[in-house]
Image: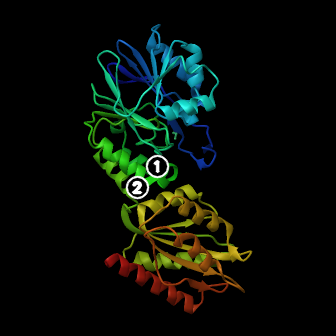
Amino acid sequence: MYCIRKVTDDLTWVGSNDRRLSLFEGVYSIPEGVSYNSYVLLDEKTVLFDTVDKSVDEVFYENVAHVLNGRPLDYLVINHMEPDHAASIAGVVLRWPEVKLICNAKTAAMIRQFFSFDLDSRAVIVKEGDVISTGRHQLTFVLAPMVHWPEVMVTYDLTDKILFSADAFGHFGTLDGHLFADEVDFYGEYMDYARRYLTNIVGKYGPMIMATLAKASTLELNYICPLHGFVWRKDFGDFIGKYAKWGSYEPEETGVVIAYASIYGHTANAAEILACRLAEKGIRVKVFDASMTPPSYIISDAFRYSHLVFAAPTYNMGVFTPMDTLLREIAAHNLQNRTVAFIENGTWAPVSGRQMREIIAGIPNTTILDGPITIKSSVKDEQNEALSALADAIEATIKK
Ligand code: FEO
């Protein structure tokens, strides 16, 4: 049975929610679920904007058919070819064989890679700035490479000032019957989902996020329709502001993320002591056990806060594996403009401090505080004092 909601009089959301997917992209846990958004425009021509993941395609086809109500589907606009939005393209072509696929040249190449149907007879290849009229509506296209794949474009409805923003401004979390962000407490309940989504999935491509924001800033916007999460129709300035922070790698807040990996609890003890010394100074602290918390959650808060402390034992003459994984993920995301410190542990040959530093030191604009603090098996008076001194040093950088 169809399940739809109206965005405007002639634009309808025809997507669906997935609450059973354990790992988004096979790597990000999403207990909050995710929505796959698609939209149908009824004009003199009918237009479908993107499709959905195959996990929800049956209800999607029913939704589209219900909204079309027997009309043919004239156009499918393909803003993004990642299969969470493009998997159902072949199913759309099968059900509405007369449909024309509006896409750019890079997208067309990917369609040929993913599918085997005849594209040449259906493709309408567009470039940035091209305009297609569907009757009352005029659609134009803006390239947004690497937000999140190289072929990504966003579509702007010049008539009703609607931005179909692809992955941009999307978030994890299901819609639960709501469609608009102003129907829920977005900033209170969903911002963490949005931050973890954007920073992990597109965080590496900050300059491309900023380039897309610059293009979007020239557009008058009544609605933003992303491919995941809520549609925006008001009060989206703060959300765009968060994107500017994430895209430029500027912390949202002053505070310290302490991530530790600990085998028998002594490295964890050092992390807890440091957290106490910092909190006593009125500094916001978040502590994570990297053995228990997946990297995506820690990366999300690493984008949020200004200071990072990593604590890990030496293991097989390297960095204990949960911390090694986390640090390489952070380096891969190119997180910049952070002040960083390290705490190492080793009962007979501590080397994890130097090796953690080597992983992080290559990231541009990283300030590494003196150290590392070295624990030999467990925290003694000497390390206790060093942890207090580290808290002082962090406080000093904050005051500066
Ligand atoms: Fe939601 Fe890059 O796909």
Image-based side of 303 in relation to 348, left or right: left
Q: Position of residue 388 (x, y in %)?
A: 47, 85
Q: Which mark is residue 246?
A: 2
Residue 209 numbered tag: none
Q: Are marks 2 and 1 in contact (CB under 8 Å)?
A: yes
Residue 394: x and y, percent?
41, 79
Q: Which residue is mark 1?
A: 198
Instruction: Between residue 251 and residue 292, name the one nearer to us.
Output: 251
Q: Secondary structure at mark 2?
A: helix
Colouring mode (rainbow / by chain / secondary structure / one colour): rainbow
> What residue occupies the far bottom of the structure in this picture?
382
Q: Residues within 10 Å of mark 1 (few under 14, many from 20)?
A: many
Give how far apart the Cα atoms at labels 2 and 1 are.
Answer: 8 Å
Residue at figure coordinates x 58%, y 58% from the top left: 295
Dot 2 or dot 1: first in sequence order is 1
Q: In this view of the protein, which residue sits in the foreground, 92 or 172?
A: 92
Decide: few, some or many residues near mark 2? Use Cα within 10 Å; few <14, some 14-19, many ≥20: many
Q: Amino acid at mark 1?
A: Leu
Q: Amino acid at mark 2?
A: Trp
Query: Residue 37 location, x and y as percent?
Result: 47, 31
Q: Is residue 390 above or below residue 25?
A: below
24 or 46, which is in the foreground? 46
Left or right: 48 in relation to 96 = left
Residue appearing at x 55%, y 13% in the figure: 97
